[in-house]
Image (cartoon, rainbow, N blue to C red):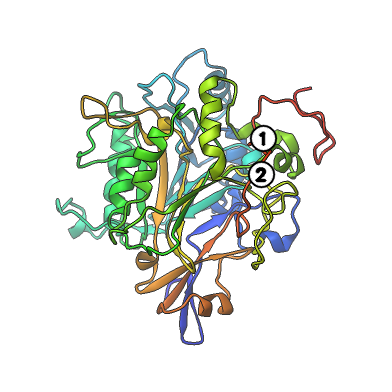
Amino acid sequence: MSRRAAKQGGLVVVKSPFQLIQAQGLPDHLNQDTVTLKDILGDPLIRECWNFNFMHDIDFIRGAFDEDTRHLVKLHIVHGNWKREDPARVRLEAEAACHDNVFLHTAFMPEMFGTHHSKMMIILRHDDAAQVIIHTANSIVKDWTTLTNAVWRSPLLPLLKSSATKDSGQTYPLGSGERFKEDLLNYLRAYDEKRVTCRALTQELSRYDFSSVKGALIASVPGRHRPNSSRPWGWVALKEALGGIPTQDEKAEVVVQISSIATLGAKDTWLRDTFFKALSASRSSPTVRPKFKVVYPTADEIRRSIGGYESGGSIHMRTQSQQQEKQLEYMKPMFHHWSNDASKGEELEDVEVHNSGRNRVAPHIKTYIRQGSNSIDWALLTSANLSKQAWGEAVNSSGEVRLASWEIGVLVWPDILAEGSVMVGTFQTDTPSRSLAEGAGKGKAVVGLRMPYSMPIQKYGKDEIPWVPSMAHAEPDSLGRAWGV
């Protein structure tokens, strides 16, 4: 039985594949089963770390390595600051120049409004093991201390046996470790299409055995792509993956929980006909689409968070233009609070409330979760927010999908984590309780999914609007500060 699985009576119980990042300022019981950057990078056996992200603080990253070996660890920073005069690039270059073991790699950015938004670490160790970490936090102090973020970690991956080092050319099933490896290497190869960026890492990772990995890689690569490509990206990749996963048809809902919402259009055409259609895909051929809900905080939730208004600097939506106002109109009926104790939100029905412990920790995490009445069909942890840049435009007249940003995430569902299992949300812990496991029903095993938000989610009140960082707020936040006034 795996490290993350245990027996409760005759039932196999599996811990959540996603872990929350520890939040400072919370009591210990609300940080149960959480992780810090030092937990991930503090092992003295680490010899090399590739860090893919949007924002980087090199001294903060190096501070998480073991203090006796950090001067020896090769740290590779993959970033998207392609303009030489970009202040972020200038700062990175100055920080890197202080250390002989820090190396900068600039990702090719073909789209003007795209970003290198992927959040991933790949670790190579002295004991000939490797590990892949996909997460939602920028490599800066705030994201790892006062915002809600989460991590998926692969098991430690051993070297392949020599007889298995060559690519067999076989196509592996989605959710298998072999398919995950294939998709990850293809993603890394995309960095090298215009200039050599990740070739050394790709060659190194090809030597490792990924068979213990349980999850599907869902990534975005900037450029123009054919939707029938053998290497799909963005919403096309997500739709293809979800088309192979069985789902419940009754009372299904997909909760889109993000930290930023881009300008999607004055009409809901892309949201409804492209993105929600992709999220509706299922092997079960459902007769109706699931109901869609969007979890995004209001100004009051940001104000009351442990980081106060400053937390909202990482959470974005705009309502200034006429197009953006029209977008707010069609999205407003879908909006739900991050916390479910909002005084102005719609009252919850008389049901049991499950407290995530993160009501006061503003969300930078991004999750997409499909749930039925008693269990969860699938869950995606990703860097991708709700935007065309991240997921891709609709198919254009040339038969192409245009993507602007680099993104990466991991999709999981019950059967790949434990055969014949059901997946249930867990709150303040990664392990389903016995009562929760027994109430989930008929599975041979029960898989937990650590929920970042409390349930049931609470709909916005009639007059509530989402947090917009450009708006000024005179009312003091939890730290006694105003915003933009």
- Local secondary structure at mark 1: helix
Q: Is residue 108 above or below residue 418?
A: above
Q: In which quadrant is the N terminus drawn?
A: bottom left
Q: For mark 2, does the 10 Å Cα neighbourhood hold few (<14), some (14 to 19), or many (20 or more) residues?
A: many
Q: Which residue is mark 1?
A: 312
- Local secondary structure at mark 2: loop
Give the residue displayed 73% in from the left and 61% down from the top. Answer: 28
Give the side of residue 227 with respect to residue 483, left or right. left
Which residue lies most toward the front here?
462
Answer with the quarter of the image where residue 313 lies.
top right
* CA separation in Å, label 2 and label 1: 8 Å
| Numbered tag placed on residue 199 in the rendering | none
Q: In which quadrant is the C terminus drawn?
A: top right
Cβ–Cβ under 8 Å for marks 2 and 1: yes
What percent of the width, then of the height, locates residue 56? 55, 32
As shown in the figure, which amino acid type bears the numbered disc 2? Answer: Ala
